[in-house]
Amino acid sequence: MVLGDFNLIRSPENRNKPGGDISEMFKFNSVISALGLNEVNLMGRKFTWSNMQPQPLLEKIDWIFISNCWLNNFPITTAKALDMIPSHHCPCVVSISSSIPKVKIFRFENYWLENPDFLNILAQSWNSGPAIPDSAMNLNAKFKRLRKILRQWKASMTSLK
């Protein structure tokens, strides 16, 4: 992630008034492209800097860029602009998260071993279902089936209490 006050705009739309050096914009965009960076869109505000005059010049000169590697690891990277007071620049808050689902962890309960029904449930689960020719896949399928049955068994035991 590369972020900060670059004092450069990327296009004429990054100003509220006409102007800006097209050559500088081209160079800035060329460097961003050569580095393979992606802009993180800024929510909440179009411009990040003001000259604080009665008829202010407003520009977006604060930028947040991420690499493709960053994007793969943190696909939900967002940025929000806050109020400019007391600065000429608005602070930006970057939030990083991913959409990788959290798996509910399965935990084996030691007290199950003391239940007289446990070995029967284990044997029924382990011996049911179609056999898969690939032994690793077969073992994986057996564990998944057993986990599902044990979760149901645990839920039924909890509801009896």
Image: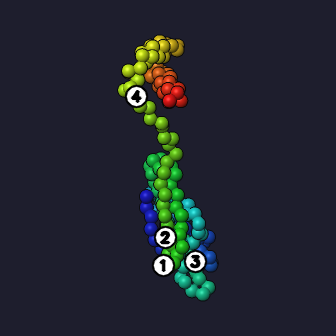
Kindly identify the amino acid type of the residue bearing the numbered disc 1: Ser
Foreground: 55 or 86? 86
Residue at 57%, 72% in the rendered image = 47
What numbered label is drawn on residue 58? Answer: 3
Which residue is denoted by mark 4 in the rendering? 108
Say if residue 37 shows up in the picture.
no
Tell me, what colour scheme is on the image?
A: rainbow
What secondary structure is found at the residue carrying circle 3?
A: strand
Circle 3 packing at 10 Å, graded few (<14), some (14-19), many (20+), is: many
Residue 124 x/y as whole percent: 48, 13
Under tag 4, what secondary structure? loop
- Nearer to the camera, 13 or 56: 56
Q: Which residue is mark 2?
A: 91
Q: CA distance from mark 4 to mark 2?
A: 48 Å
Using the image as rendered, state which of residue 145 and residue 83 is in the foreground. Answer: 145
Spatial separation of the CA atoms under disc 1 and disc 4? 56 Å
| Mark 1, residue position | 87
Number of numbered discs visible in the structure rendering = 4
Neighbor class of circle 1 (other Cα within 10 Å; few <14, some 14-19, many 20+) is few
3 or 1: mark nearer the eye: 1
